[in-house]
Image: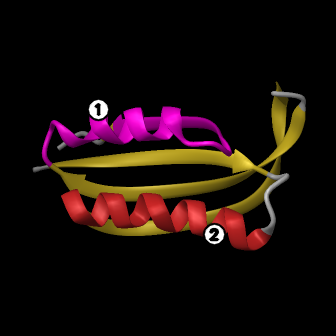
Amino acid sequence: MAKYETMLVTSSNLDEEASAALVSKFKSLIEANGTIDSVDEWGKRRLAYPINDETEGVYTVIKFTSDEAFPAELDRVYKITEGVLRTIIIAEEA
């Protein structure tokens, strides 16, 4: 098992309920394949540059522990999910 940190930026055009449902979907996916260590909701912030003509996004940072194969699957799901602007998954050093 390895430790990871993921940040996802969701569209600010989504209402608060839809944004929370999207984050909840990813949290349950992570819990099904590992354990969540912490969730840090940063809220709505201005983007450094426009993405899909949007200038703001809702930031969420999730630290989790899982096996080494899971982050690739998580990244695949991020890419096919509507409403996700940007993501990154980082392996933490042991």
Relative to residue 79, is residue 94 depicted above or below?
below
Q: Which residue is drawn at 73% across and 63% down?
A: 43
In this rendering, would 90 be left or right of 61? Answer: left
Q: Residue 34: in sight, yes or no?
A: no
Question: Which part of the image, by quadrant, shows the C terminus?
Answer: top left
Q: Where is residue 12 in the image (x, y as percent from the top left)?
A: 81, 52
| Disc 2: which residue | 20
Location of residue 70 (image quadrant): top left
Q: Position of residue 61 (x, y in %)?
A: 52, 55
Residue nearer the viewer, 64 or 69: 69
The residues colored magenta run 67-90
In this rendering, would 64 be left or right of 39? Answer: left
Q: Which residue is drawn at 39% across and 33% down?
A: 76
Relative to residue 71, is residue 31 depicted above or below?
below
Q: Residue at x 51, y 35 (%)?
A: 80
Q: Residues within 10 Å of mark 1 (few under 14, many from 20)?
A: few
Q: Residue 59: in sight, yes or no?
A: yes
- Indicate which disc residue 72 carries: 1
Q: Which amino acid does label 1 sit on?
A: Ala
Q: Please, what secondary structure does the residue beneath circle 2 have?
A: helix
Q: Which residue is drawn at 81% across and 27% down?
A: 52
